[in-house]
Image: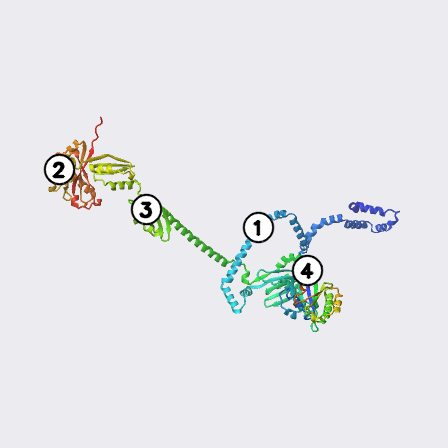
Amino acid sequence: MIQKKVCLLGAFAVGKTSLIKRYVSSLYSDKYLTTVGVKIDKKQLVVNDQAITLMLWDVAGEDDYTTMKPTYIRGASGCIVVIDMTRLNTLYTAYMVYERIREQAGAIPVIFALNKCDLVDQWALEPKHLEQLQALQMPIIKTSAKEGVGVNAMFQNLAQLMLG
Amino acid sequence: MSTYSSAQPTDAEKILAKAIQPNDDSQDLERLRLLLLGSDYIGLLALKNQLQDVNQYTARVASVLAEAIKLRSTENNSALSQALLPSMEEAIERFITSDPQKMANVLYPVMGPAIRKSIHETLNQTLETFNQLLEQSLSPKSLSWRFDAWRTGRKYSEVVLMKTLVYQVEQVFLIHRETSLLLNHIVSEKAIAKDPDMVSSMLSAIQDFMADSFTDESSLNALRLGDLNVLIEQSPYVAIAAVVRGVAPANLRSLLIQTLETVHQRFEPVLKHYDGNSEAFASTQPLLAQCLQAQRQGKNIQKKRPWLAYSVLGLVVAGLSYWSYNEYLERQQLQAKQQLWQQTLAEWNALEGIVILDHQVTANGHVIRGLKDPLATDFTSTLSPQIREQFNPTFEWQAYLSTEPSLTFQRVKQFLNPPQSVELNLEGSTLKVSGTAPVEWVKQLNGAWLYGFGLIQLDLSQLVQVNAQAPLQQMIQAITQTTFFFEQASPVPIASSTEQLPALAEQLKKLKDLATQQQLAVQVTIIGGTDSKGALEFNRRLGLARAQSLVDQLLGLGVPQDLLVAAVSATSSSNGVTAEDGVQRSVTFKVVLERVAKPSG
């Protein structure tokens, strides 16, 4: 059994917690996010006939008033950076977070999740923004926590990248 | 120089030979070295050669290997065994895989004792657990704990733990520091562990949180919640966390540090390049298990005999013995009853005129079915109270005619109703009739004879047939009707009786003549009787004296002597005669006629 530490990062209220809520086994309540700044969940997958356990660190979102604790990223084998498609500034936060990841954890696999993709009429991200993001050459997956779109694929994809 | 040349003759001589060649320009430097350092240089070269040549070096090390290991193992630390452990493990694993039978043979002598010891230990442990359970559920102490639990609203198990335990290490986590992933986890028997993967990560997160929030320099090494403590120790790559209930002793932390060091020492390369695969750390299980320590309160530390368990077991054994003894007694009683029943049935079956066909047990008692001859003894009215009480038998009889000799004889006698002067005897299947019988009766006997009685032959050779109208018969009747009476205790007949004497004497003489004429032998028995008063012996003598006195008087009157025989009748009160004593104080006469055997030829 292989275990991997995975961090879910992104701006405040982009839907990190919602993304994983229905797909993982939980031991701790959401209040840890606001108190300790992190909540840990577990997701078990099978990739290429190999069982893998993802320890998901749901790290409290970053905004103007809160700073993400970089130590939580240390030791991670992969990261999911969540962007809210209806709020442009979450994309900028994502860039900052991405840089933080590279500082703290080096060249680990990162996936960008474009969340709330179901709210098509409220999209604030334009094609040019997406092109900029693609320039980072990291996988981008559209997800919807509300409708359960792309979440499993996202975890599966990341697990595959981490196993090389 | 000779020493080196003898040790390494080829190399040393070669070098020396080269060095002293004056015309070789390229070896100038070498020559210079040789001249400056002399024989030391040759020695150094030989040593260098030894180190470079694999075979030589191996041989050199081999010669001191055993001593080196011995020296290292005497130094009081476990570094050598820890260094050898992975190789040893691998070697043993290979050995077992390649030839399991050999390993089985090697282990055979130790397996038996080990298994026995293990079973013994397990039994002991079970007994102790049982005892503990009893103590916890039955003793006054446990009742007071239950009361405490009820009063404070806590769980009973919590109260017990609180009251009995000084401390117990419930879980030990081995955590990879960088990734916060769980390398191994161990939990004590009675503790409950929630998802250790997540707990491990969360512990690390909290540590990071503390470090970020308050200080960067030192790390969190203890958490406390109520009586639950988490002790944490860290090394560069790995952290160990022990969840302790109660007050942890100081040496527990040293043990954790020691364990951490050992893990670090053994797994450093794996830890450095840890990729999330924790399989290699499965072997840390025994190390972590050492940390699962516990201490109970004073009284319980001393190992005491599980008296409560013994006494409960004793009670159970006593109960079982009592029960089985009772069972045994009941079985014995039942067996005796059955035996008695079989015996009784056999006895009944052996009775003449009774055949038991079958018997059944009903709610009310035993029902016996069988055959019964009307003449058979009615034993059912004289059953013993024991039989009645135990079996309450009821009988269903069917009538039948038995061919048992005694019953046949009884039936024949009843049917033939023979006169008093006739005697019947049954010998095998032959009925013998003897005595004197009237001709009419004999006729009836011959006519009525039925084989239906199961008799085959009739023997009348001893029977004298007489005609009731004939003078002989009339004479016999007259004689037998004569009776002499006596006064009490007197052998002399009363006067009124004596008057009959002359007539009787005449009758007797005539009887003799008539019998002789008919070629019959005749005998008259004079039977003296007494009343039932007085002793038996006295009465016998008195009866005989009365008979003899009459015999004497009759002889005096000319009656032939061979005709008369004096006899005495049964003379005691037990003879069942209910006639008046006056009648018994008498002399009576019995006449017996017999055929005279004709002289042969």
Q: Name the residue under label 2.
A: B504
Q: Is residue B214 visible?
A: no
Which residue does the numbered mark 4 point to in the structure image?
B276
Above/below status of B381 relative to B134: above
Q: Do labels 4 and 1 share a chain?
A: yes
Q: Distance between the residues labelled 3 and 1?
A: 76 Å
Q: Which of these two is toward me, B496 or B521? A: B521
Chain that bears disc 3: B
Label 3 sits on residue: B398
Mark earlier in primary sequence (4, 1): 1
**Which quarter of the rendered picture does the N terminus of chain A lie within?**
bottom right
Image marks 3 and 4: residues in contact by CB distance under 8 Å: no
Task: Measuring from the top left, give residue B104's x and y in whole percent.
Answer: 61, 48
Which residue is depicted at the point 29% across and 47% down? B378
Picture coordinates of residue A152, whole percent (x, y): 67, 63
Chain for numbered disc 1:
B
Amino acid found under the numbered disc labelled 4: Gly
Q: Mark 1 points at which residue?
A: B113
Q: Which colour scheme is used?
A: rainbow
Which class describes the residues within 10 Å of circle 3: few (<14), some (14-19), or many (20+)? few
Of helix, strand and loop, which one carries label 3? strand
Residue B289: horizontal and vertical position, in percent?
61, 59
In the image, residue B361 sits, relative to residue B551, either above or below, namely below
Labels 4, 2: one chain = yes
